[in-house]
Amino acid sequence: MEGQRRAPVSLRDRLRYRFDSTLARSTGRLVGWLAVVCLGLVVPASALLVWTDPSSPRSLSGRLLAVWRVSAETLRLGAVSGAPLRMLLSVLLGLVALLYVSTLIGLITTGLTDRLTELRRGRSTVVETGHSVVLGWSEQVFTVVRELVAARARQRWSAVVVLADRDKTEMEEALAAALGPTGTTRLICRSGSLTDPAALALVSPASAHAVLVLPGTETGGDAGTVRTLLALRAVLGEHPGPPVVACVRHERYRTAAALAAGPRGLVLESDPTAAGLLAHSALHPGLMPVLRELLDFDGEEFHVTEAPPPAGRRFGDVLLGCATAAVAGLVRADGTPLLNPPPQTLLGAGDRLLVVAADEHTARWEDHRDPVEPRSPSRPGPGADGPSRFLLLGWNRRAPLLVDRLRGSARPGSVLHVVTGPAEQAPPSVPEPRGDAAHPTGLTVTHGRADPTDPVSLRGLEPHSYDRVVVLAPDTGDTGDTDGRSDDRTLLVLLVLRALAQESGRPVPVVAELADERNRALAPLGPGSEAVVAGQLTGLLMAQVSQNGLLATVFEELFAAGGSALRLRPAHHYVPVDRPASFATVVAAARDRGECAIGYRCHDPTATPAGYTVRLNPPKTGRRVWSRADDIVVIATEGPPETRSGEQAPAPATAWEDVSRDMA
């Protein structure tokens, strides 16, 4: 502004401003200033060397010539003396040599920089064979990669390749922070669009052991999964390719995804899986740790192993024949798995056994009938439970599936009360039952409004009067949850329920759905309560199925209503309590009841929050004192009695069964 005085500027600031302005004008000015600075330093220093040298020439011309030689040698411009033309040509040759060397160094530096930039961007082709490929980045990525690393821990060299539309360095840092050391398994990250065939070709899917396509964001992600599968099929061409395991959130996309995945593809549904897990926890408390143990590679899980000779043996006879594995079923020669077939089922040529073991190669066959101790006849199984009362707090896109699962499995006369908050979207209508007159449902569904985070409102619901309280997590939106904040409301509701339980002195068994595995340790769960992280369990299931496609049908049957299922039975139904007995005795008693015993759950006060420890595939010769607080983990078949005599009645093949045979 006119008339306003400018603050005084120091000489240093003025010179700095002039220098910066000169450098910013052009490259030529920068080169000129560089030459001036070099000459301003080299020439005076060379003159000082000459004038202080006792052996230098006495004449002025001789000393100036010596200064020239020293300066030229320093600047690599040549040291030719004599006629001015010779000196000029020497300088010219020196400048040409300097220009060539500097240009060469610049080209090499630029090439290396571009190559390093390309490598950091993750755009180089992976040259591997037998590696696992993970496509996408979602809440399941850490679980899937961790399980793939554990599954390949016994291999000398292996690789897990992750391709996502994210920065390569960020992915590597996130995986390293979440997983830690990975042993001999290398983690390789590549960056690119999942729907671009050129980007998919970078991970060499044709030579991979398996390809896993993670679910996308909640809205529009399933369509992206279908596009990814189509792009993958375009890369593979006529090549059958490796087994492909994909996951969609909504049921309506499964048919399109299965067609795009090809003949060796398998498509899982995360929302029905999550609803089934929540229903299992509500209907059969205590099973969630067993499922996690079976789905986790770090421990005991399902494997398929060769049956001991000779063919024609009864299934019940081999239950006590394996020292290092718990037999849970068989796989027919045509690839059809049968969970817990009747004991009198005959093993045919080519049949294999489904076992629970640490590794598929550790099965050792020995006769363990000797450790079976004399016992009283097995008690009959418990009768049908009475009706149950369920309280459902919250509503999300998985809630209708959960209600449908509870309708199909709850005892007649059971009640489900759905409570939604004032700001929460209420169910448009209570989902209608899918049963018919021949198979009526036994669940009555009601709806009310209250704020679950308000202690007064929640106290009015009397949560202690329900057999099970289910707390649903809110939908996390299009971008997913990156900071773990989507569980804030769930954690607050759990705190209020815990306070009401302490206030009333009566426990409130809770099944809490969490969106982030990191919040499991923060969940204030009381005795008999469980947390279900559906995304983590879906990732575990994808990793298991990618290693053995036959397990798809096995887990589908375990998660479905009816058929063979995991159950916890009181230990005193199998062995006398307060007396030592071997696990072989438990296996024999379970066989007599038409069940397969694969482990037990014992009371452990140090285990939080449930107070129990699960042990799968214990040694059959191991003896322990059983108590009434112990439970036996069994695979029991629930269905019409006509399917339990002799050979099991063949069931219609499902999409899981057809694809799992191809993958196997």
Image: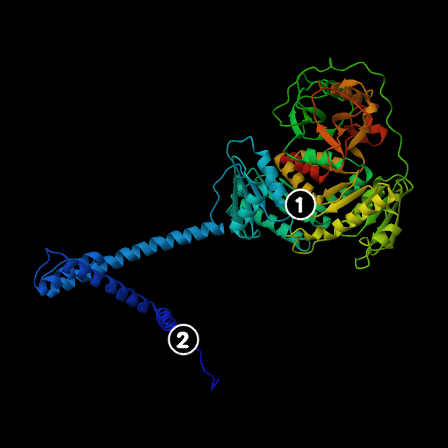
Task: Name the quadrant containing residue 527.
Answer: top right
Task: Tell me, for residue 390, which label it has, or none.
Answer: none
Q: Which quadrant holds the C terminus?
A: top right
In primary-sequence order, the first of circles 1 and 2 is: 2
Residue 575 position (above or below residue 23)? above
Q: Is residue 360 left or right of residue 417?
A: left
Q: Secondary structure at mark 2?
A: loop
Q: Which residue is mark 2?
A: 9
Which residue carries the number 1 mark?
Answer: 518
Q: Amino acid at mark 1?
A: Arg
Image: 10 above or below 170: below
User: Relative to the observer, which residue lies in front, 618 or 235?
Assistant: 618
Mark nearer the viewer, 1 or 2: 2
Q: Amino acid at mark 2?
A: Val
Determine crowd level at label 2: few under 14, some 14-19, many 20+ residues with C-alpha closer than 10 A.
Answer: few
Q: Position of residue 51 (x, y in %)?
A: 14, 60
